[in-house]
Image (cartoon, helix red, strand yellow):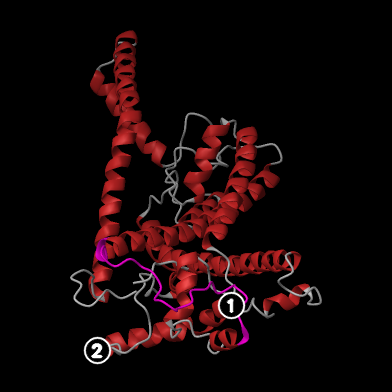
Amino acid sequence: MACRSGCCCGFGPVNEDNARFLMLALFIIIYLLCGAAVFSALEHPKEKQAKDRWAQRFEHFTHKHNLSKKELENFLRHYEEANVAGIRVDTTRPRWDFTGAFYFVGTVVSTIGFGMTTPATVGGKIFLIFYGLIGCAATILFFNLFLERLITVLAFVLKSCHERQRRRRGVLPHSLGMGAGVAGPGLAGWKPSVYYVMLILGLGAVLVSCGASAMYSSVEGWSYADSLYFCFVAFSTIGFGDLVSGQRERYESQGLYLLGNFVCILTGVCCIYSLFNVISIVIKQVLNWILARVAHPCCPQQPARGTLRHRRNVVMPGHFRARRDASIDTDGINDSETDGRRVSGEMISMKDFLAANKVNLAIMQKQLSETANGYPRPSGSNTRHNGFSGGVGALGVMNNRLAETSVDR
């Protein structure tokens, strides 16, 4: 809602984008500082204990075996070099046979990068640069395409549940088949809530992590808490490398376990990647809500008198519905049509989502061409600066189409 005449508050579209960027940067800095304080309080005392314990053992060993500290330090440096090459005190599987190399390239292209295996030759390091450049880009594209299809399936399932619920309430006629509700009256513009999608993805990630943790704790001998920790570190592609699965020389049912390990990591990475993208939508919504309160403190966001504010999934009278169904172009959609959807946190319908995917590459090429040739964007564009505009690729589709949850201005 626009500010009243003479109001001194508010930002222009460019200033709003800058304010949103600065707010997000400030949030990340505060988040980092808080995280550093918590981890320092939790881990620093144990680090000091480990250093003191190691100094006592080192001193005791040198006296017991009559060794100089310098000789023992040189020997330990040699062991550190061997450790980088994959040599451990306990017997482990070869790092650079075909199966070990396949595990390595999987951690490269998935951007997990555990770090327990690294190329030691100059040729291997140079090849890794070009190999990772293409492999990481292709894998990210795969994750984006997986996300598109997952959102489409979830939208279809949630829409079917919504249709069944409306039939039970008598809002929709029972004569319509279950598949007819997708294009049926009152449901053509219905969009599932982004919070429901986040909840479903969160439950899916928890189920995958719990199942994988049960497998790792029984096969690898880790505690269940360590297994959950490994699952999150691996699935989120953080990849510290302190715990790595499948590194023993022999396992019972080794082939089956290695296959299960691959499937669990692939499924977990896809689920966590999708969940992170949906959570980012919620974070953007919160930032937009805070920005709206800061930018328009004297302008309560209420609909004008006589203006109807409806959710897009509400059954509307014929003339309202006809006007709403006149266009599916979400970039050029009018304000009255998007207000309810942005406030309610609903997502785009499957029809709009699939249509947006088909034209997204052409839009990206057009934007890149205009930028390269210095053509300014039309000032009269109908695109709203809602904090989710911009971005390319499948993730841009989510930001621009699915995340229509910003508050009105």
Residue drawn at (52%, 62%) of the image: 194
Residue 225 vertical position relative to residue 232 in the rendered view, above or below: above
Residue drawn at (66%, 44%) of the image: 257
Left-right relation of 253 to 85: right
Give whichever of discs 1 and 2 has the lower sequence position. 1
Q: Amino acid at mark 1?
A: Gly
Residue 316 within the magenta-colored segment of the rendering: yes
Rendering coords of residue 332 (x, y %): 43, 86
**Which type of secondary structure does the marked residue at label 2 adopt?**
loop
| Residue 109 visible | no
Residue drawn at (30%, 10%) of the image: 66
Is 177 or 293 nearer to us in this picture?
293
State the separation of the CA atoms marked 1 and 2: 37 Å
Q: Which residue is mark 1?
A: 189
| Residue 123 visible | yes
Q: Quadrant of the C terminus?
A: bottom left
Q: Amino acid at mark 2?
A: Gly
Q: Which residue is mark 2?
A: 374
Rendering coords of residue 142 (x, y %): 53, 67
Q: Main secondary structure of the magenta part?
A: loop
Magenta-highlighted residues: 294-318
Left-right relation of 236 to 84: right
View extreme (right): residue: 175
**Which type of secondary structure does the marked residue at label 1 adopt?**
loop
